[in-house]
Image (tube, rainbow, N blue to C red):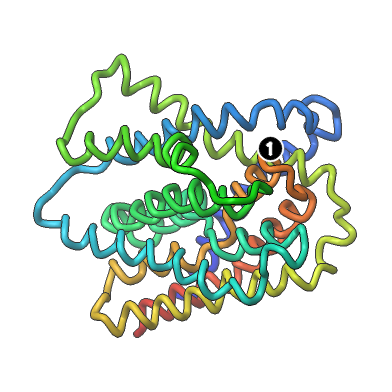
Amino acid sequence: MFIDNMQTAALQVGILYVMVFIGFVACKLKIFPEKTANDNKDLLFYVITVCVIVKSFVDMEFNPDTISSFLIALCCNFLTFIIGIIITIPILKKKNHPDNPVYRYSAIYSNAGYMALPLASAILGTEGVFYCSTGVIAFNILCFTHGCRLMSKEEGGFGWKKLILNPGSLGVIIGLPMFLLNVELPVVLAKPVEYISSMNTPMAMLIFGTYLANTDLKTMFNDKKIYLVSLFRLLIIPAICIGGYRLFGVSGTLLVSCAITAAAPSANNTILFAAKYDRNTSIASKTVAVVSFISIITLPIMIAFAQEI
């Protein structure tokens, strides 16, 4: 089982990094330079991301028999990110160093969509994807509220207008009522949402590749803070969450799906947020890359731990 999980995790990382490599080469050949990537990040943020969130709600089937488990999974995934927010405060304080918000964001927020959902599908099947999708909801609500405030250089809070008028909140505001009312979009709307949302992973990975192309790869594994981020993101946070949820009676597929979200590597949008808020995209690229590589080893360990306890 451990070897199977490692192979599944390695395959998902490999698929993502093939797209990153294409973006890397395209940038080096001036086909898709960093400036073009920067020009496209708002399209990814404000159009593609909203479509992804809306589609995730529309694709879920409202079933009274499973709604309690769905709500438990949603609470667990919110707690996962909140635990990360709390325990990283004394380690990476925002004011101590200008790059600390990048490190802290990458320690708190996991790759809930690009890594966790494919892993849940491969390991747990449809039921696992259903529970794991709550991690995407929690991720989008928190990363576009707390995450934006963390990365922003503005002082004095985030503001209610920005809390509501951001891709994560807008997607939930549109999608949640559709899920609760079991609304089925007409084909003329459903297909455009599906096609646009399908651009999410490749667009994000290509942009990731352009930032990596402008990073000093020789120093990628020399940053000690990246290993601190890896320790929190891949081991400490998931271990606390898995053990805590099990103590409160969560088990089986529900526990393993929550473990996958908790143990996934740093979110790819760490790089996009760094670019959006004028943070160090080189640090963000190196951190996401290194943590993702290390997760090939740690993810199967955490999944096996959740399956055994």
Q: Can you name the residue that lies furthest to the left here?
A: 64
Would you place residue 46 above or below residue 218 in this image? above
The residue closer to the viewer here, 174 or 112, is: 174
Percent from the top left, x then y, of residue 171?
38, 36
Q: Can you name the residue that lies furthest to the front here?
A: 156
Tell me which residue sits at (71%, 31%) in the image: 37
Q: Of the residues shown, which amino acid type is indicated by label 1?
A: Ile
What residue is pinned by disc 1?
A: 207
Q: Residues within 10 Å of mark 1 (few under 14, many from 20)?
A: many
Would you place residue 175 above or below residue 212 in this image? above
The residue closer to the viewer here, 170 or 194, is: 170
Q: Can you name the residue that lies furthest to the top here?
A: 188
**Camera sees residue 17:** no
What is the count of numbered marks?
Answer: 1
Which of the image's four quarters has the C terminus? bottom left
Label 1, secondary structure: give it. helix
220 horizontally vs 184: left or right:
right
Tell me which residue sits at (61%, 39%) in the image: 204
The residue closer to the viewer here, 114 or 181, is: 181
Percent from the top left, x then y, of residue 215?
84, 49
Residue 241: name its quadrant: bottom left
Percent from the top left, x then y, of residue 85?
52, 67
Which of the image's four quarters has the N terminus? bottom left
